Image (cartoon, grey):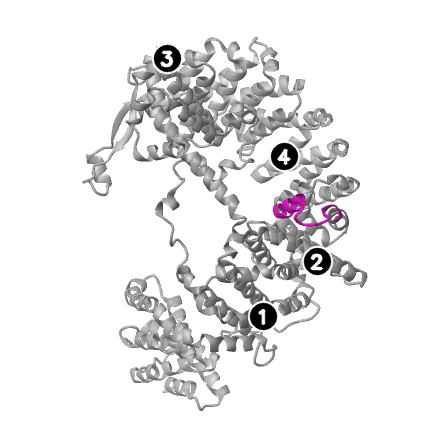
Amino acid sequence: EFGVHLAELTVDPQGILAIRQLASVILKQYVENHWCNQSEKFHPPETTERAKVAIRELLPNGLRESISKVRSSVAYAISAIAYWDWPEAWPELFQLLMEMLISGDVNAVHGAMRVLTEFTREVTDTQMPLVAPVILPEMYKIFTMAEGAAKALIFPVVQQFTEAFVQALQMPDGPSSDSGLKMEVLKAVTALVKNFPKHMVSSMQQILPIVWSTLTESATVYVRTEVNYMEEVDDPVDSDGEVLGFENLVFNIFEFVHTLLENRKFKSTVKKALPELIYYIILYMQITEEQIKIWTGNPHQFVEDEDDDTFSYSVRISAQDLLLAVASDFQSESAIALAAAATKHLQEAEQAKSDGNVHWWKIHEACMLALGSVKNIITESVKNGRIQFDMHGFLTNVVLVDLNLSGRMRPCSLTNHPTYLKISECTHVLQPFLPSILDGLMHLATQFSSEVLTLVMETLCVVCTVDPAFTISVENKVCPLTIAIFLKYSNDPVVASLAQDIFKELAQIEACQGPMQMRLIPTLISIMHAPSDKIPSGLCATAIDILTTVVRNTKVPLSEVLICQAFPVVAQCTLHTDDNATMQNGGECLRAYVAVALEQIAQWHDDQGHNGLWYVMQVVSQLLDPRTSEYTAAFVGRLVSTLISKAGSQLGDNLDQILRAILSKMQQAETLSVMQSLIMVFAHLVHNQLEPLLEFLCSLPGPTGKPALEFVMSEWTSRQPLFYGQYEGKVSTVAMCKLLQHGINTDDKRLRDIMVKGEEIFNADEGIRTRSKAAKNPERWTNIPLLVKLFKLLIGELSSVMEANISRQSTAAGWHQDEVNDMWEDQDDDDEEEEEDEGLAGQLLSDLLSPGAGVRYDDDYYDEDVEDDPDTLKDPLYQVDLQAYLTDYLRQFAQQPCYTPFSDHLNEKEKRVLRSIGI
């Protein structure tokens, strides 16, 4: 009967508290050790059936207990018993828990939820099939009654709860209140605001001032106890004995602000408080003493924690997230508020420094982090004159001065100052500091492994761009260091990419070219000469990539070492490797040579009399060889197009051989990227050599015996809507315009007689097309003339680019939408009844799916930094405004006599597109 007595003592409301708590703890142990002989922790004797019945009857009363520790112990005991007895021996348990959940008794609801939490945590995989059918229907009932329960239970007492919450938040920490209680209160307030914003409007006048007071007072406590560790604080402990760090309260304050931002009813509240809010956010972004201790002992951890994609979480990161959120929602206002807050903080830091406060530098670092986090907004606002912020003074008096500090400050400045070097237009102020910065970087580079090195090398690359004269003077330090790092960390793609960036900067300074090439090129040649089993995997391909960067960025004429030594080695390496990456990179490297120094490689000859062009032709043949993987041809189209563009007249019969090889490869290729690369060669020829191209393709048989022209056009038109890349889209689309116009103007029989796939034919009675139906009834397509297909494709391209432009303009306009939204925020609640059901409501499926017709026109379509290929950027086609070009072309086409028969083939969507441009 021992267990029964423990249960009686635990749930006795008149009992002495200390005895009840002790009994509840022993009861937990008793259930674990004696309830069932199948338990791993079982010790005899086993509890009798009579005692089990009595305990099961007594314990549920303890879930209503007002003392949380007793309630939690009872919940744990019930869940442990349920693990063995439910549902067979205790079928009524869930009904009891359901009654408690909707009882309105706060203690009972908490107790019942604790049982469910503990119980579901213990359910094993083998039990789940038995448990789920019983638990899930019960949980479904809770969810389906949630709205009714909310109206019945929560709404009538919102005002009372609000008053209680306000009192709890106002109460000073002591025996009856601590940060743990306030954290739970904030969680509850946040949940109410998030789920029932309309009913919380009237209560917010009481809540907002006290939450704001909690945020500001907590900042003072946080800086004193966590950031500077000037005094210790006793962290509260929850009912399970877990320590609740003070930072948990801060997290919940920030979460509350995020919730306000997410709802239009409360968004303007945050906007009005931006100057003060951002001032306090910067306080919370300071480095803590604990972080200093960890990062000093392990710099790698510092880099990992401060990375944009870190999995770490801290008050510092949470504050940064909040700053990014308000900056996203209120771009202009945030820039003004941040500039003012940073200026105020820096003034206060100077005063603290004068007063002998050793922690003054933390505010400097937090300001750097804050400004760096939203650097684009700040610099744009400074340029436009919307804010007054002394960027020059900030660089000179804060960033650069702090960089000269030893110890703690340096790594923290290092993580932020590349940002300012890049965004500032006054980099000349850095010149006096460059020697000490470089020395510091060299020192750091020799101390740490790849995590810290990425930060060091990124900064080193920026330093190389500041003052060419300084860079020339230190090339003998920078280049050997970069080569050494590249070789040591050759398997790290990030380090290799950063090394490439440094070599690029050095190559662009004419006085650095000779010395750098004498150091670097022999290293790259030795890597390309080495047997593949003697060097790390991927090193040869990376070495070729670096050589490409040097060739692309070196002023012509190229040096003897690049032409007479590096060129033949990369050509031979590409011809004799079986590694796809090496072949691809080799092809791109030779394309760089052709684009930059065609005459030099044409004049160079080997001992057998073969010139550089002969070698390029051999590599093209190798990449197009039917025996090699199709992926080797992924970039061959660009190589061939550059070769034809630069050396067309010198190719002679070689051009025919190349085109034959491309046709052969097209018959094997299955991957879209490879097929696009090959088709683009013909698209380029349409622009420059249309008639010779048509003659050539008509002189050769395709795979079906018909002229190869039909094969090429069939493959091209079927894949055009899938092509990706802004430049490739323009080249292909404008080429189709030229083909269509040529076919109409000349009535060219070679094009007129070709029939291609039109639109897929669907059977309205077929229903959903399953795999078995597809096997029995293959896809069926209409057949239409090639010229009609080209016309329809051009309309499709116009539709896609118009949608992309609208999307881009909407995104740009979104920055200024808050001002428009504010006009609606003060409307009566009646106008916003539907707001609580947010998410995808009100959006049409077509809105969600469009403009996905062409992956070419995604969010990156208009990103100016996406395309970095030098040959592409020089092509006038890259600058074509495709929407304007197609609009003008189709309007002119509509005036021609052939338009009427062509328009008979258009579907409703295509007609709608034409109507939108006045046709």
Q: Which of disc 4 and disc 1 is earlier in sequence?
A: 1
Q: Callout 4: few (<14), some (14-19), or many (20+) C-alpha neighbours within 10 Å?
A: many
Q: Amino acid at mark 1?
A: Pro
Image location (x, y in percent) of residue 570: 56, 22
Q: Secondary structure at mark 2?
A: helix
Q: For mark 1, what is the residue?
A: 209
Label 1 to label 4: alpha-carbon separation: 51 Å
Q: Quadrant of the N terminus?
A: bottom left
> Toward the viewer: 84 or 891?
891
- Residue 471's place in the image compared with 99, above or below, is above
Q: Earlier in the sequence, mark 2 or mark 1?
A: 1
Q: Position of residue 201 (x, y in %)?
A: 48, 68
Which residue corresponds to mark 3? 746
How far across and down, in percent of the image, does residue 259 sit? 50, 61
Amino acid type assigned to the residue bearing label 3 in the image: Thr
| Helix, strand or loop status at disc 3 | helix
Q: The C terminus lies in which quarter of the figure?
A: top left
- Numbered circles on residues, count: 4
Report if residue 526 is visible in the image. no
How far apart in space, not on screen, are marks 2 and 1 (Cα)? Answer: 26 Å
Left or right: where 129 falls relative to 277: left
Describe residue 859's horizontal placement relative to residue 308 as left or right: left
Q: Is residue 102 left or right of residue 621?
A: left
Q: The disc labelled 2 sits on which kind of residue? A: Ile
Q: Image quarter for residue 337?
A: bottom right
Mark 3: give few (<14), some (14-19) or many (20+) Cα within 10 Å: few
Magenta residues (range) = 375-393
Name the residue beneath numbered marker 4.
Answer: 501
Picture layout, residue 769 above or below residue 708: below
How far apart are labels 4 and 3 at the CA level?
Answer: 51 Å
